[in-house]
Amino acid sequence: MPEIPDLEYIRDTLNWRLAGARIVAVQVYQPIVLRSMLREEPARLLVGQKLQRCERHGPFLRLRFSAGLSLICHFMLSGRFELVEAARSQRPRHPVPKSACLALEFELQGTRLIYHDPKRMGKLYLVEDVRLAEVPRWSSVGLAPLSPAFTLTAFQSLVRGNRAQLKSFLVNDENLAGIGNAYADEILFEAGLHPKTLCSKLDAAAIKLWYESIGRVLDAACREVRWRGEPIEVKVRDFLKVRNRAGEPCPRCGTTIRRAGVRGFDAFFCPKCQPVQGKTFIDWSKIK
């Protein structure tokens, strides 16, 4: 799923390319993903709307339109946006793949913003701005890691006394909004913390290191994704150090990177650089 660095890049790209542009056509290919919270037909409501700006709210992207309407995008596992330039008049229109669920065509020479979701797990909510709190999970998102509110004191208050495992804590949007599987693994590797360690096992120094690692990893990833400048549908992850690298040598110590399940999520880690705090069923330090 798109995580904070991906969402930041998509938001900035859409603001650069589409802010101020008006929608001239709407195609709904998979109605199941479009949840209108209004009585009128969504396509009819969106045509003529001008995109004022795109905003990020935790794992959500919000397309704010004129007349007090917003399209809230929760990408979930497989949702993604694609910007498609209109084909020249002498060429046929670019075919729409089966994964396409919704297409918004803008007045900018027919540029289209297409929402793809082959698994149909994501959700798009068309809602009046005054009713944003009614969007599922919108009001329950936790602390924003890139915001001024993300202070060490605020983070300490979330962690202390929490019985969750570190990986589970990070991917829970009610704790920190917008961190998913990939960057949770990278953050824990940066901090030298095992994904199965309990939050309650960390002392003040470890909590501070964890907090600082969140900022470093996300800042560096945002810069890297922005520097690559790939199309917004491309998920740039090849620079990550441990995610999806089971069986490869740790970039720090050379120990084989391992994969383990953590409360329904998978976690990639170095058993030497990230020793577990407390007992687990498997002694990862003895596995070669």
Image: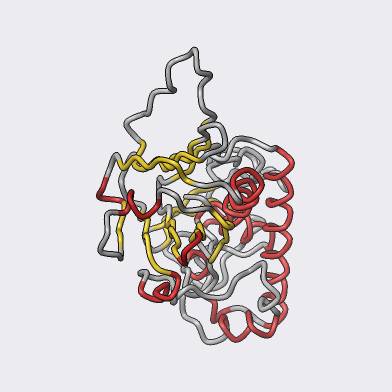
Residue 95, position as x, y percentages in the image: 39, 23
Residue 31, position as x, y percentages in the image: 26, 47
> Between 177 and 274, which is closer to the camera in this rendering?
177
Q: Quadrant of the C terminus?
A: top right
> Between 64 and 191, which is closer to the camera in this rendering?
64
What residue is drawn where x is 40% and y is 52%? Answer: 46
In the picture as drawn, the residue positioned furthest to the front comes out as 48
What residue is drawn where x is 54% and y is 51%? Answer: 182
**In this view, 29 is above or below 199:** above
**In this view, 226 is above or below 150:** above
What residue is drawn where x is 50% and y is 82%? Answer: 162
Residue 138 placement: quadrant: bottom left
Residue 254, position as x, y percentages in the image: 69, 43
> Between 268 and 8, which is closer to the camera in this rendering?
8
In the picture as drawn, the residue positioned furthest to the top comes out as 90
Residue 118 placement, left or right of 185: left
Residue 211 placement, left or right of 281: right
**In this view, 146 is above or below 83:** below
What colour scheme was applied to this rendering of the protein?
Answer: secondary structure
What residue is drawn where x is 30% and y is 46%? Answer: 120
Residue 173, position as x, y percentages in the image: 48, 69
**In this view, 140 is above or below 167:** below
Residue 246 placement, left or right of 229: left
